[in-house]
Structure formats: C-alpha cells, structure tokens
Amino acid sequence: GAGVSQSPSNKVTEKGKDVELRCDPISGHTALYWYRQSLGQGLEFLIYFQGNSAPDKSGLPSDRFSAERTGGSVSTLTIQRTQQEDSAVYLCASSLDGGGPNEQFFGPGTRLTVL
Amino acid sequence: AQSVTQPDIHITVSEGASLELRCNYSYGATPYLFWYVQSPGQGLQLLLKYFSGDTLVQGIKGFEAEFKRSQSSFNLRKPSVHWSDAAEYFCAVGRAAGNKLTFGGGTRVLVKP
C-alpha cells in the first residue's frame, strides 16, 4: 500500500478485556513508532522499533502494554486487562530508519474506547 | 528531558490574513524540529522540518518556519490562510537516537470567512 495502515479503525471493548491493534508500515521502512493521542495527555510516544528490535520502550505506561514486530514489517500493540484510562487514539508511524531526521509517516489511527 | 510548548491552544484568523503559531522547545543539543498538521478525522501530515543549515525552512501548503536558537523557538507562519487551513497544528522535537518525537499540546486554528 501507499501509506501506513492500521486496523481496526475503531475498537470498543469492555474493561478488563485484552485488545490487539495492528500496524502495517510503509514497505521498506525499518523504523516503526507507536504513539497515543488522548484528551488529557496529548500526543505521547509509546515505543520505537528498529527492525524487529525495540531499543526504546520508555513510553509504555504500564506492564499491561506490550508490542512486537515481526519480519521487520507488521507490528501489534497489545493492551491487557484494559482500563478506561486506556481510551485514546493509538497512532502508528514509520520512517526509513530511526537514525536521523527522517519524516515519520503516520497512519490514520485506531480509536479505542474502553467501557 | 526534551519538551515542547505551544502557548496558544486556539487561534481564530480571517481567511486571507496571516497566521503565526508559536513553538518553544527545551532540548540539550541541536534538535530536530517538525511541524505536523492534523485535519479533522485525519492522520498527522508533515508540513516541514529543520535539522541543520538555513534557519528559515519552507514547507508544503505555503507554510514556513524559522528556527531561532537564542529563543529556543520554531514558529510556523503562513502569509495568507485559506479555509482549508483550519486544523490542529503540532510542533515536535526529535533526537538523533531513534528520533522519537515529543509533541507540543497543539494549536487549533479556526478560519473565519
């Protein structure tokens, strides 16, 4: 595809359930980022992948959050035992690599609502 | 730690008037600086970036920004706004290792006819 894609576009879940959010980066982009956008906290960095490794996980808010990337491409962000404060738009971005001021191309996001 | 401040939460401007959005950053070294725009229901789109060289950078859609090291600022400007410029604008700072972005709180721009 031409851009970063994310699925699902919307997810409504009940408190305590686990959710998986998927990101397909632009082909050939080795760097992949997850961010969260919420009313209270604005846009926050969550995790950065270079290839399949995650050298920076400093933004993950708790151990309920985890992410993986396979084949240097698709990434999945998993939230276990969701809480209402996890409600937000989760944005994925990719760039050619993470070593310089390369443009990060953002996907449309997944809006997560925890009831 | 790096941080970004956008002092104006909302700005209303008349169509055809000039626009300036303020951005101040805190970072211990020469930063990478970015401006992104987010239209309603859309993802983030890069307007322009600065990492070295000429401190006045040109971007897409007629936007420009000026890096002022002495003021730790990277203000965004457009000489004449169009109704389609109504959106939320985010300033961000990145760093060399991994280039994770730290965003400001955003400025929402409303364009009056």
Image: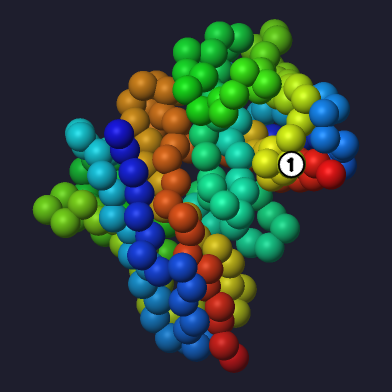
Q: How many marks?
A: 1
Label 1 Cα crowd, 10 Å radius (few <14 / some 14-19 / many 20+): some
On the image, which quarter does residue B20 sit in?
Answer: bottom left
The chain under label 1 reads: A
Q: Residue at x 33, y 26 (%)?
A: B96
**Image location (x, y in percent) of residue A91:** 65, 39
Nearest the eye: B91 or A95: B91
The quadrant of the image that shows the N terminus of chain A is top right
Outermost bottom residue: B113
Nearest the eye: A55 or B57: A55
The quadrant of the image that shows the C terminus of chain A is top right
Position of residue B62 in the picture relative to residue A114 (left or right): left
**Image location (x, y in percent) of residue B67:** 24, 54
Q: Can see residue B72? A: yes
Q: Is residue B41 above or below residue B80?
A: above
Q: Residue at x 53, y 68 (%)?
A: B108
**Image location (x, y in percent) of residue A22:** 77, 27
**Image location (x, y in percent) of residue A19:** 81, 27
On the image, which quarter does residue A111 sit in?
Answer: top right
Outermost left residue: B70
Question: Label 1: which residue?
Answer: A84
Position of residue A47 in the picture relative to residue B25 (left or right): right
Q: Can see residue B82? A: no
**Dot 1 amino acid type:** Gln
Q: Residue at x 64, y 34 (%)?
A: A92
Q: Is residue A43 above or below residue A65?
A: below
SS at mark 1?
A: helix
Position of residue B8 in the picture relative to residue B40 (left or right): left
Q: Residue at x 80, y 41 (%)?
A: A114
Q: Is residue A93 above or below residue B22?
A: above
